[in-house]
């Protein structure tokens, strides 16, 4: 599908954009269900650094983490550990949340609500948020959600929030007795052989060839965040392509096609998965942004093609636009030129 000429065109296009927008480092990958068709690194792991980006460089993918967490929940469902449509207090008996719409709303909130952003939560938790990270643990962060007030009645509408995904990860931690990152490693990451992918802040902090996030106005950005399930994942472009292949292959032998389909049911968002259009091409996946990183991981199910773009900067306009352009260029019958204003969505689903 990718000719040598097309690879050359893509390489020149991406390199030009990296230079134009002064992106410190960028990794891009294109895959089908069977192989990585092209992956490449541009720039370096830190601004002004001399360690080049390659297929093994770990990037924070921020809210792309939500796809992995939703997949882990479905794997737990497959094992009979959880159910999607029972109240969360079955797994977290102490769980409470405030509401001006009804009494005891927690009795109606389910894992489906948490993963689909329909529980009515606000965007951030009081403890450990995108705006005030702090030093609190994942558990302390999740338990602070109990003090929040719902913005909408349970199940009334979609409202993007980090809280539900983190609570879903906390449910897994409680029902399995394992730290969330350990369950995710055993249930999902190891079976897919994603050895350079982790939710574990200790593993991430000590990893070699790790990209450093950059954002104007910040001399130093945190690596460890309490929002582990919603935004704590680091991965490489090659590992990210491997995860997209898991979807392109229908869950392989790991997750049943019926349960995988649960992730995709919805008009614009399923369970931890966004549903979008890239210049008329239907794609699934997620975007993420924050703490000096922007990322996009999407696949076109009908065309059996995946695209990954990872950057260690938030100071550029490439999020979603570059991934969407790659889809159109690769899938077009001829050369695809023209301005980015043909692309219909200006940004990814960030944290």
Image (cartoon, grey):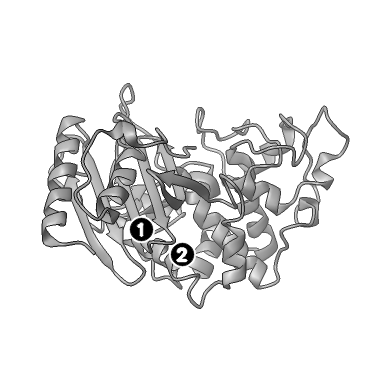
Mark 2, secondary structure of its residue: helix
The picture places residue 241, in percent across and down from the top left corner, at 34, 61
Q: Which residue is mark 2?
A: 247
Residue situated furthest top in the rendering: 217
Q: For this view, does 115 lie left or right of residue 319?
A: right
- Callout 1 secondary element: strand
For image coordinates 76% across by 39% down, the residue present is: 154
Q: Residue pushed farthest front?
A: 333
Image height of 161 relative to 315, above or below: below
Q: Position of residue 142 (x, y in %)?
A: 64, 43
Placement of the N terminus among the 4 image quadrants: bottom left
Q: CA distance from mark 1 to mark 2?
A: 9 Å
Q: Nearer the viewer, residue 268 or 186?
A: 268
The reply to whether residue 309 is visible in this rendering is: yes
Label 2 neighbourhood size at 10 Å, few (<14), some (14-19), many (20+)? many
> Which residue in the protein does label 1 denote?
306
Using the image as rendered, state which of residue 260 and residue 237 is in the foreground. 260
Residue for point 20% across, 35% down: 47
Mark 1 touches mark 2? (CB < 8 Å): yes
Q: Looking at the picture, tell me which residue is in the foreground, 25 or 201.
A: 25
Of callouts 1 and 2, the N-terminal one:
2
- Quarter of the view holding residue 75: bottom right
The quadrant where residue 260 appears: bottom right
| Disc marking residue 198 | none
């Amino acid at each position: 599908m990718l000719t040598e000429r097309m690879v050359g065109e893509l390489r020149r296009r991406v390199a030009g954009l990296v230079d134009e927008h002064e992106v410190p480092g960028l990794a891009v990958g294109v895959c089908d269900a069977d192989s990585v068709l092209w992956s490449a690194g541009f720039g370096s792991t830190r601004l002004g650094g001399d360690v080049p980006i390659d297929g093994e460089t770990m990037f924070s993918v921020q809210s792309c983490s939500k796809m992995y967490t939703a997949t882990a929940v479905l794997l737990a469902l497959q094992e009979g550990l959880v159910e999607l449509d029972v109240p969360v207090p079955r797994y977290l008996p102490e769980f409470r949340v405030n509401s001006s719409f009804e009494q005891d709303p927690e009795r109606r909130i389910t894992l489906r609500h948490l993963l689909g952003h329909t529980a009515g939560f606000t965007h951030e938790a009081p403890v450990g948020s995108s705006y005030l990270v702090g030093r609190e643990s994942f558990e302390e962060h999740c338990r602070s959600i109990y003090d929040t007030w719902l913005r909408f009645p349970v199940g009334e509408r979609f409202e993007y929030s980090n809280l539900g995904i983190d609570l879903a990860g906390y449910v897994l931690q409680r029902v399995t007795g394992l730290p969330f990152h350990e369950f995710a490693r055993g249930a999902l990451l190891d079976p897919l052989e994603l050895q350079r992918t982790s939710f574990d802040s200790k593993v991430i902090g000590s990893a070699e060839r790790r990209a450093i996030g950059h954002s104007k106005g910040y001399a130093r950005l945190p690596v460890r965040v309490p929002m582990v399930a919603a935004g704590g994942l680091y991965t490489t472009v090659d590992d990210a392509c491997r995860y997209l292949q898991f979807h392109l292959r229908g869950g392989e032998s790991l997750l049943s096609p019926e349960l995988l389909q649960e992730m995709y049911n919805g008009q614009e968002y399923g369970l931890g998965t966004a549903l979008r259009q890239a210049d008329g091409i239907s794609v699934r996946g997620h975007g993420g942004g924050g703490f000096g990183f922007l990322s996009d991981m999407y696949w076109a199910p009908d065309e059996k093609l995946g695209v990954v773009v990872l950057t260690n900067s938030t100071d550029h306009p490439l999020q979603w636009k570059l991934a969407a352009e790659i889809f159109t260029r690769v899938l077009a019958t001829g050369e695809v030129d023209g301005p980015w204003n043909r692309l219909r969505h200006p940004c990814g689903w960030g944290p």
